[in-house]
Amino acid sequence: MTGDKPFWETKRLDEMTRAEWESLCDGCGKCCLHKLEDEETGELMATNVACRLLDRRTGLCKDYKHRRTFVPECVRLTPRVLREIDWLPSTCAYRLLDEGQPLPDWHPLVSGDPESVHKAGVSVRGWTVSEDEAGDLEHHLVDRQL
């Protein structure tokens, strides 16, 4: 902390250490859900289908360090990449901080409780299926804000 403020309120994303950057992830798991793009409009549509590496109970990757070996299209999020993608959840700490917004009260860095994201109902816990079990993504569209 700088003074009485936590690092996420005093540093730009590109000034954070690797540990600080990684701690911004709230474990919601929503960035690991498959999305479908409407070919005519370009609109992204949410599904309840999670990446095979996502632990749907914790909202964390089962093999984060080696994830790109198993899922080559998995994005390594950086401050630069953050500005190039438009599918991060509206509640994503990286997105919020980049837009100059505060972290929500349920964010684990604010609450001090890693379960707070699940208790607040903003994670993938309880409503998703693994891509290994899902079948056609078109059958898994959901009316949820990501």
Image (spheres, rainbow, N blue to C red):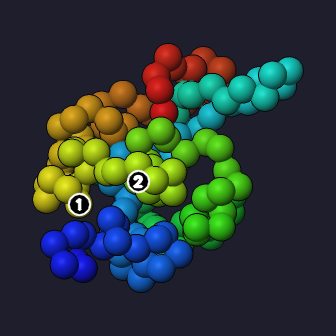
Q: Is residue 58 above or below residue 35?
A: below
Outermost residue, bottom side: 17
Residue 129 vs residue 60, the one in the foreground: 60
Q: Quadrant of the N terminus?
A: bottom left
Q: Does residue 55 appear in the picture of this structure? A: no
The residue drawn where x is 19% and y is 78% is 3
The residue drawn where x is 33% and y is 65% is 9
Amino acid type of the residue tagged 2 in the rendering: Ala
Secondary structure, mark 2, is helix
Return the disc, 1 or 2, that comes first in the chain's sequence.
2
Binning the other alpha carbons within 10 Å of mark 2 as few (below 14), some (14 to 19) or many (20 upward) gives many
The residue drawn where x is 34% and y is 71% is 10
Residue 24 spot, x, y in % from top left: 36, 63
Q: Is residue 53 above or below residue 116?
A: below
Outermost residue, right side: 40
The residue drawn where x is 40% and y is 73% is 11
Q: Are marks 1 and 2 in contact (CB under 8 Å)?
A: yes
Q: Is residue 5 above or below residue 59?
A: below
Residue 144 spot, x, y in % from top left: 46, 22
Residues at marks 1 and 2, CA–CA distance in whole angstroms: 10 Å
**Residue on which the image places disc 2:** 93
